[in-house]
Structure formats: structure tokens, C-alpha cells
Image (cartoon, helix red, strand yellow):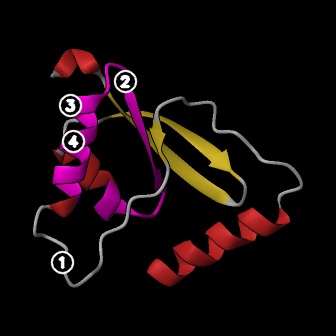
Amino acid sequence: SDKIILLKFFINFFFLKKKKKTGFNNQIIFLAVDKNIIGQGFGRKFINKIKKITNKNIYVLAEFANTKAQNFYIKNKFLFYSDIEHGLNKIKVFKFSIKLR
């Protein structure tokens, strides 16, 4: 749930001794939409705007258990790229290739 995701985010922020990089450039680490406006297209519009203004591949990170986010990225033409561990989190990485435009 949202509270668990935020708790893990803050634990990672405060307790990792040094900033751990994911190794991906041009990445969206955290995208959230208020639960009262989910389904109204704001996330899709944001992603589409990012796709238009960049000429590089885009990587997005989603918690391993967050299947809603994973399905959202797949629906928006991101392809599964890899699994990584980032602090306490298991993360799925999705990639949007500029070749898919």
C-alpha cells in the first residue's frame, strides 16, 4: 500500500550510508497520482509529455509488489527491462525505447 511504499522510501533515505545509484540515466523514480484522481489520465499525460521532450530511452522503477504501477507502464508502451535491489526494495525496471515512438 501507499504507506508501506513511503515508509520504505524514508528508511532507504535515512539509513543507507551513501547514495546508492540504480545505474540508469533518464529515469523516473517516483510517480504518484492522488487516489481521488486516479484514472483521469494525469499519469498518462505526464508520461506522454516526457516521451515528447526527450530523445533518449526512459527508465521507470516500480516496486516489485506494485502490480498496478507495472501494468500502467506496460499499458504506456514500456517493456520490462530488469529486476534490481535498491536499498531495502526489490524493484522492477521498465524501459521505453525512443525507437517505439
The residue that disc 3 covers is 52
Separation of residues labelled 1 and 4 (CA atoms): 18 Å
Q: Are marks 2 and 1 in contact (CB under 8 Å)?
A: no
Q: Earlier in the sequence, mark 2 or mark 1?
A: 1
The residue that disc 1 covers is 37
Instruction: Return the x and y of residue 78 as percentages of the image width and height.
Output: 27, 36
Q: Earlier in the sequence, mark 1 or mark 3?
A: 1
Q: Earlier in the sequence, mark 1 or mark 4?
A: 1
Residue found 67% across the figure and 50% down from its top: 86
Separation of residues labelled 2 and 1 (CA atoms): 28 Å
Q: Which mark is nearer the camera, 1 or 4?
A: 4
Separation of residues labelled 3 and 4 (CA atoms): 5 Å
The residue that disc 2 covers is 57
Instruction: Note whether 5 is above or below 54 in the view shown.
Output: below
Q: Are marks 3 and 4 in contact (CB under 8 Å)?
A: yes
Residue 46: within the magenta?
yes
Q: Which mark is nearer the camera, 3 or 2?
A: 3
Residue 72: within the magenta?
no
Residue found 23% across the figure and 14% down from its top: 99
